[in-house]
Image: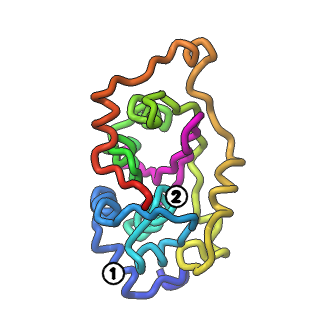
Amino acid sequence: MHDLGLTPREVRSLRALRTPYGVQRALEAMPYHHASTAWSPRRVLREWTAHCLEGAIFAAAALRVLGFPPLLLDLVAVQDTDHVLAVYRTRERWGAIAKSNFAGLRYREPVYRSVRELVMSYFDDYINLRGDRTLRAYSRPLNLARFDRRRWMTTEADLWWIAEHLVGVPHTRLLTPAMTRALRRTDRRSLHAGLVGYRRHR
């Protein structure tokens, strides 16, 4: 891992997470980062806070240290914020790790046969504060190893260029126009459940 710029201590810290679920537990232990930043995994590890994008990139780096490819997946929403996942495969099944302010948009066990199936598991929980179901499309998985020369795992500079690249990756629509028109808002109970642990910006 030295060729990736990680220090032995950083490698030990990431290896100590042991499994994808261990990586998710680390993200859960971090306060949600309300800031217009795009920190590298090194900075997230040092500051111990992350938001959605930072959490996904951190998880991708941790997965890489654990022997998985560092894959990101972009979820596109309307009248809502987009979401980024770190995705992985175990025994030919897809799972995901994520940092989110919404309870239902985080970890997924590796039980999904395809990326689309994995993405659809987020559909009912992907709601805005009005209760609208907002998920509309998803990207192909992006392997961050292609950016190793830019030191994405260790740079002190923001990584907004990764988010910008994700926008340009081919995306697949999930719904037809007729499906979109027929959508109903979620019920109040489900909305409240999704907001368990929600951290407001102060």
Residue 48 percent across, percent down from the top left: 38, 73
Residue shown at 46%/66% (left/top)?
58
To which quarter of the image does residue 17 belong? bottom left
Residue sitting nearer the eye, 67 or 11: 11
Q: CA distance from mark 2 to mark 1?
A: 23 Å
Q: Amino acid at mark 2?
A: Leu
> What secondary structure is marked by label 2?
helix
Magenta part of the protein: which range? 67-92
Residue sitting nearer the eye, 161 or 140: 161
* Image position of 134 (left or right of 10): right
Q: Earlier in the sequence, mark 2 or mark 1?
A: 1
- Reply above or below: 109 against 121: below
Residue shown at 34%/48% (left/top)?
107
> What secondary structure is marked by label 1?
helix
**Residue 87 part of the magenta-drawn span:** yes
Q: What is the crowding at mark 2: few (fewer than 14 residues within 10 Å), some, or many (at least 20)?
A: many
Q: Which mark is residue 12?
A: 1
Q: Amino acid at mark 1?
A: Arg
Residue shown at 59%/34% (left/top)?
78
Residue 9 percent across, percent down from the top left: 37, 86
Residue 141 percent across, percent down from the top left: 56, 48
Q: Which residue is identified by label 2? A: 53
